[in-house]
Image: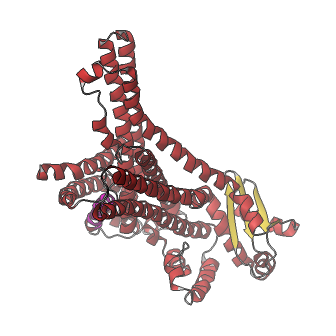
Amino acid sequence: MFWERDNLDDDRNKLTYSNVFDYPLETDSIFRIFLFALVSITVIIGNYIPSFLTDTGSSPLAIFPVTEFYDVDKVFSSPPEEFFRNVMLFLRPITIQILYMILIFGISFAIYKKRPAGIIKKNDLKEINDREAVEALDNIRSKAGLSGKIFYYTNNKILDFSAQVFGAGKNLYLRAGKGLMIIIRKKNFDLFESILLHEFAHIKNRDISKTYFAESVLKIPFLITLLTSVILMFFALTKSIISRMIDTGISFGVLFEKILVYLNLFGQITILLMLLFLIFRMLIRSREYYADLRAASWKSAEFLKIHLDKNYEKEAAENFTERIFGYHPSSGNRSEILSDPIKIFKPSYKRIYIDTLVSYIFFSGAFIYGISFLLLVFTITGYSMLYLLKGMIDEVVHLTLVYTEMIFASVCMLLFLFLCGILMRKTFFFQTEKILITQKYKKDPKAFFPEIMKLSLFSSLGIISGFMLLPLYGFNVLYLKNLISIPFVFAITFTGFVLLNLFHYFWMDHKITNEYKVDYSVPVVLRIFEGAAIVIIFLSAILSFQFFSVLIFN
């Protein structure tokens, strides 16, 4: 177990720059959460669209009592048009959600593909044709172990000593400032090489597609989502006020309440969109640390550290807001990680909190989507049974329809939950695995339990914050009585996370002791078990928030 590591050789207890990449990169984990957040927002907005443009409630759950196939006598005497009306109640939100998601992802991908051409045009870049300069760049690229084609560009700014890699798909580009190519390359080649190796490390770490796609989402799609929510809120509010005025008139109190409800909904969407910016910032910062460490594994970190330390002295006088809220980490923090690579594996409570907060919102949106899908299946099969009794269809057609729909729905739901379990597991357990990695290289056997307790605590708080930000039922203002559920949900989720983290810790502790690598050594059966357990915890939380409120007040 972990206390046996005292017998390991000192060399095996030292983390080198290359050893860092024996373990999964946190950049990948953050990118998965970014995609979770993006899908969640598009599903929620896609749910608002049919809800606000029609007379149904603000979620498919509110549609449930509208359908009438449960009333056998009424349906038995109703015309076929009634069947299609009820089917469309569920089919409409499902279709709009899918189309809206395709729209956002499609626009993001189109922006991503055109991004390289935009960077070249905006910065007036010219391809490098100097044979000596190209040869120097090719040699550094070979040192980085990159064999694919990279297009080299520069600009006309003699005081530009920076470099940047960008691209889309397999088309990769390097922008090297004119000052870097002419002055630094000739006066301080070691620094020149270190800067270029850092940029090529981004390619080696597969950062380009992740960061530039995420950046593309924060362009036009972000504004489309915000604008769509504003238009929907305004339309729904206006429609509600006019209908009330025509029917019975509307008092100031009712008007004020309506305005507060829609302002609350708009605030929720705005906060979710700001979460995208926060996660993107985390993504950029994470990739910079890993690029430094990768470059240091190819060349001595001395020149890169000297460069970062000089930059840090200049940054001290910069704007406070830029240093705190800027996308790139400070040169001082980057230098600190280079001095002691083990610090990159320090467990992050902020990150696990955001992970579970976003995951809860994702599961809530998925739950609404799943309810729509299941109710659609029940509606079709219910009407199929009644039309069978009326003699409008034969038994073979009815049974074929019922079994086909049930099998299709079950397979879709299971595949979705299985995929979510895999993605959540790889994201959630990374902070737990950081404890193991740290203890492997810095012997501190007593630290694991408090760390696991803290991670479990912040995980539960993330779920609760997700509920308070976006209550599941109706997506409306959080009623005071729903707060009663929070202590019960906290107890359930905290206990579940502690048990699951401890299980994962002791299993992976054994594997790491025997020189297996984190995550990759977990058997498939255990991955499925852990993924299913995480899904169960989240589903239990989603259902419990409503269950305990109803149990206490009814």
Q: What residue lies at 39% left-to-right and 51% top-to-bottom?
A: 362
Say whether residue 161 is left or right of residue 448.
right
Say whether residue 360 is left or right of residue 481.
right
Q: Main secondary structure of the magenta part?
A: helix
Q: What residue lies at 26% left-to-right and 68% top-to-bottom?
A: 450
The image shows residue 194, relative to residue 206, as above or below, that is below
**Which image quadrant for residue 312?**
bottom right
Q: Is residue 347 visible?
A: no
Residue 468 is one of the magenta-drawn residues: yes
Position of the N terminus, as image quadrant, is bottom left
Q: What residue lies at 37% left-to-right and 38% top-to-bottom?
A: 372
**Which image quadrant for residue 190?**
bottom right
Question: Residue 488, image x and y in percent?
Answer: 18, 56
Say whether residue 157 is left or right of residue 425.
right
User: Which is nearer the eye, 117 or 333?
Assistant: 117
**Which image quadrant for residue 330?**
bottom right
Question: Residue 340, image x and y in percent?
Answer: 48, 75
Say whether residue 162 is left or right of residue 313.
right
User: Which is nearer the eye, 341 or 514?
Assistant: 341
Magenta residues span 451-469
